[in-house]
Image (cartoon, rainbow, N blue to C red):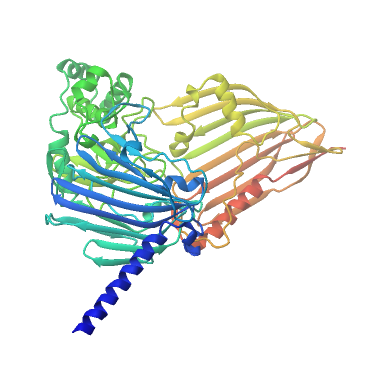
Amino acid sequence: MLKLKSTVSLFLLFISLINYSQTEDAYTALLVPLELKTKANAVVRYEKKTVEILSSDEIKVTKKRITTVFNEYGNRHINAVEFYDDNSTIEEIEAHIYNDFGEEIKKIKERDFVDASAVSDFSIYDDNRIKYLNYIPLKYPYTVEYTSEVVYENTAFFPNWQPIDDYYVSVQHAEYEILNTAEVELKLKKENFDNYNIQEISENHFIAENIHGVKYEAYTPELKTFVPRYKVALKAFKMIDVQGVNNNWSDFGKWMYDKLLTGTDEIPESTKNHVRQLTAGVDDKIERAKLIYKYMQDKTRYISIQVGIGGWKPMLANDVDKLGYADCKGLTNYTKALLEAVDVPSYYTVVYGGRGLRDIDSEFSSIEGNHVILCVPNADENIFLECTSQTNPFGFTAGFTDDRDVLLVKPEGGEIVHTKIYEADDSVQKTLAYIAMDNSGSIIADVDITTTGYQYSIHEGIENDTERDQQLHYKDYWDYINNITIDNISIENDKDNIVYKEKVKLSSTNYASKSGTRLIFQPNMFNKVTNIPPRYTERKLEFTINRSFKDEDEFIIQLPEGFEVEAMTETKELKTKFGIYRFQMEKLEGNKLKYVRTYILNKGNYEKEDYKAFRSFRKQIVKHDKSKIVLTKSL
């Protein structure tokens, strides 16, 4: 028996020494495993996040994170930051700084953290605050140990786990554990756990070890889509004294409608009468909706306001009507109220807004989204309105809320639907030009650019710039044309048809280069692809082309008197899964040439093995866009 006790004691001592050694090693930058330094600006040496569910109304989150930083790009990965408000309390927050030998050089207590309002520059009011470590290192590498404990009386926003939280960050040890002593029922979802070194220690307890940093590659989809994530939500939760039920999107949407929207859409009788008069005699509901949308745009402006029910409850429509400003929630809710006054139904809609495409997770109901828009149902088609913009055309979503799953908040419950997809034929840029070249190689040109769809969203807004900024815009747009002078600009923004029209008169001295008696120039003067995607010896990640588009170009070139074509490439055509490219040259009467070009890019998700072919496609386009014509003096 004594021998057994001695053996057990020795074993426990051995384990204790190992754990002590590992903890000590985590502070020493020199002991970071070599393979974890590759493609890493920082390495998470140790991280443990524990979420204790005290009840459906309260959770406590404890964090410990030890991060070794190798350069200035790694500074932001120490993650020594906490957000808080009236419904959360920071019980503990502290940091220790260590040099490369693991010796402590600084201790930072709570009073030394920066405490600031977590508002954006365009927010009029926000009740969120932030405490963060603002440490400027004297040398690299250094290591930060950060610990915190925060109690939340708002359980709608449950801390999920994503051990790889950015590019160029390796993970030596990351741990996540939920202590559910209150036995609150949970919704759980694992994403992308395969092919990563993640162990499930017990229920809701995971450890990730020795995960190499991810290098960013061009056209890579959002990081969240391919790294491991553990998503958690409470089926019974509280959002600032408002109880909620979340079994599915239908439940969650009904909760939002009943608890966040009901009672917020009252507007003055005088406003109702005004919009009814405005739409009097207009039988078509979509035409009435257009008039209301324009009225709202002219009357209001966007200002960020993040208060009330976790920033999720909209400002009262009555107040928006009186003040003339609100955030996306308030403006959307106000527009909804205006439409109801003229018998046009609409639905408050939660979305992830942004240039990138990000869906509301249709399989996992929880607090999601960063923006709100309005849906006007129209037979089999949903029309979505961006209510924060004073200039957006009615129903135009390209570039910010297009092609993604969103949540409609209906009286009977939530519903996931997809926003409009802009295909290549919807997103067209058509460039027409008439160019006259003289015998010195200088040109004058009238250029017309017409854009629709996603390409409209790229060009729209130039008409609001100053004349100087417009000049700079076009000089930058055609930065490959030397000695360019912009002589005249005329812009028409046709919002009814969602067509953007630009007319530019310009000139360039010595556009064509001289070689003896010859003139040499590139006929694609006004719509060149100049960028080749980066080359990778071995592509690691899949890639995505988010949006389709089509470019159509036609240039008529008046050749200088006394010159004729000596050499030119007449036709080139490329057909791939990524798109189509073709151009052709044609001689016209009167010593003219016609250059016609079409470039179509197809949206899609592609395997990493396809990237080389995609890069080749783009490389050939760049090459062919530089095709040259040689003119010589006629005899």
Vertically, is 69 above or below 373?
below
Front residue of this view, candidates 220 and 518: 220
Vertically, is 352 above or below 488?
below
Vertically, is 168 above or below 127?
below
Front residue of this view, candidates 253 and 429: 253
Corner quadrant of residue 370: top left
* x, y percent for residue 214: 46, 57
Residue at x-position 19% and y-position 57%: 179
Residue at x-position 35% and y-position 48%: 146
Front residue of this view, candidates 558 and 43: 43
Classify residue 284 as left or right of residue 510.
left
Is residue 235 visible from the viewing direction of this image? Answer: no
Corner quadrant of residue 170: bottom left
* x, y percent for residue 145: 37, 51
Q: Is the N terminus in the top left, top right, bottom left or bottom right quadrant?
A: bottom left
Q: Is the C terminus in the top left, top right, bottom left or bottom right quadrant?
A: top right
* x, y percent for residue 341: 18, 24
* x, y percent for residue 401: 35, 40
Vertically, is 278 above or below 510?
above
Residue at x-position 20% and y-position 32%: 308
Classify residue 555 as left or right of residue 420.
right
Is residue 153 visible from the viewing direction of this image? Answer: yes
Count how many numbered circles sit on residues in the image: 0
